[in-house]
Image (cartoon, rainbow, N blue to C red):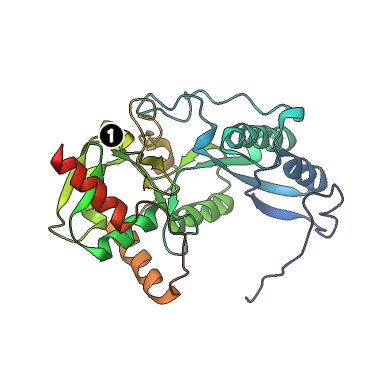
Amino acid sequence: MDGVRFVRVDRTDPAGLAALTGEYDAVVDVARHPDQVRNAVAALAGRVGHFTFVSTCSVYADTATPGQRVDAAPVLAPASRDAEDPTLSAESYGACKVSCEQLVTEAFGAERVFVCRAGLIVGPEDPIGRFEYWVRRAARGGEVLAPGSPDDAVQLVDVRDLADWIVAAGERGLTGTYDGTGAPTTRAAFLADVLPDGAALTWVSQEFLVEQGVAPWSGPRSLPIWLPLPEYAGFLSRDVTPSLAAGLRTRPLAETARDTAAWLATAGPEAGQRIGLTEAEEAEILAAWHAR
């Protein structure tokens, strides 16, 4: 790419960023390991005009209260130095990101730091597969198992919109802490944008899904982007009014679904990650639901 220079570094080595010489107008860091951030802020001290740290909504301590805003929502305690988990398990991920946020802000000052707490990131080339499950499911047709209630909250952001905002934030010098995700919608609206018109939806209660051994969110025999309520009622329902006022723009979900389907059609059978219910598992659970 014209104008781009790639520099190989070792972020686990305290001296691993020595090849990054000179001064930088803007830096974007997506690290999850606090030690990598410690090495970065030490190596770049005094040489950065604006620093963006891409964090996560997993830093929040209260996942049950809907409609929380970034300026008032409590966060997890930072990971203690001896408790930092190099494997970044689900249990330690949020706390380690809190540590990273604090390290960057302490090193460069709040007046130069933009903390972007990303939500569920979706779109073409997504390697995780949560949104992709529903796009693949749309292509298969037939009766669709819809988890929970039509009014359940769903919240996500297209990777291209998030990236555009991060770049613009660096150019504008935006500072402060914001949630990097779109406004919440309902599960019914989400499925209407992803599935074909007239798709036959069968709404299955979360209690029944648990009885049938269906896992939430991700993994085998799961329903991606479904979380049990009320304990996760706040996880996909954040008030992102401050982010939208600060320049975040999100495209229609139907466009994200269309572009993801186009990517899957051209990327080959190995594209993405196959998670969720298999066709046979979905049929089995639907039959049990109808027969109850």
Count residues near mark 1 (Cα–Cα under 10 Å), then give few for <14, some for 14-19, many for 20+: some
Q: Secondary structure at mark 1?
A: helix
Q: Residue at x 14, y 43 (%)?
A: 290
Q: Residue at x 62, y 24 (%)?
A: 77
Left or right: 48 in relation to 166 = right
Left or right: 93 in relation to 214 = right
Type of residue at label 1?
Gln
Say which of 126 and 291 sits in front. 291
The answer to whether residue 189 of the structure is visible from this angle is no
Residue 233 x/y as whole percent: 35, 29
In the rendered image of this protein, does residue 291 appear above or below residue 80?
Answer: below
Q: Residue at x 29, y 59 (%)?
A: 137
- The residue beneath circle 1 is 206
Say which of 154 and 17 sits in front. 154
Residue 177 x/y as whole percent: 54, 36
Picture mark count = 1
Say which of 240 and 131 sits in front. 131
Residue 157 x/y as whole percent: 41, 50
The answer to whether residue 96 of the structure is visible from this angle is yes
